[in-house]
Image: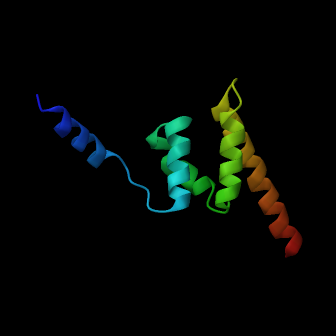
Amino acid sequence: MGSLDQEIDSFLKNKKNPTSQRAHLIQQVCDTLFDDTHFKKILGQTHQFTVAEIQEIFEEAKNWEINPQALFWKLVREKQSEIRKQITDSA
C-alpha cells in the first residue's frame, strides 16, 4: 500500500483536466449531475451553445431537487429547438 501522497498524485493524474472554459463547465456538469461517461455526449449535444447558455441550463437543473438530470436534458432539447428555429427563420 502506497503513502497518502502517492495515492493523491495517482488520483490527480488520472483525473481529466479540461483545457477550455466550455470543457471545464461540462466537466462540472458531469461531476455534479452525471458521471464522466456522459462528457462526450454533453459536449456533442451542446456544441452550438454558448458557455453562458450551458451555465444557465446547468444552474437551473442543479437547483431542481426532483430530477435534475431529466431537467438538464429537457432544457438542452428546448435550446436545440430554439437554435434550429432561429437558423431556419434566418435562411
Which of the image's four quarters has the C terminus? bottom right
Extreme residue in the bottom direction: 91
Extreme residue in the right direction: 89
Q: Is residue 32 left or right of residue 55?
A: left
Task: Answer above or below: position of 17 versus 69.
Answer: below
Q: Position of residue 37 (x, y in %)?
A: 45, 42
Q: Is residue 73 visible?
A: no
**Residue at the location (80% across, 69% down)?**
87
Q: Position of residue 78 (x, y in %)?
A: 78, 48
Which image quadrant is residue 11 in? top left
Q: Position of residue 70 (x, y in %)?
A: 67, 33
Q: Is residue 86 visible?
A: yes
**Residue at the location (78% across, 61% down)?**
83
Q: Nearer the viewer, residue 46 or 14?
A: 14
Q: How is the image coloured?
A: rainbow
Q: How many marks?
A: 0
Task: Answer above or below: position of 72 versus 88.
Answer: above
Task: Answer above or below: position of 10 versus 54.
Answer: above
Q: Position of residue 6 (x, y in %)?
A: 17, 39
**Residue at the location (76% across, 53% down)?**
79
Which of the image's four quarters has the N terminus? top left
**Residue at the location (62% across, 53% down)?**
45
Q: Nearer the viewer, residue 86 or 57?
A: 57
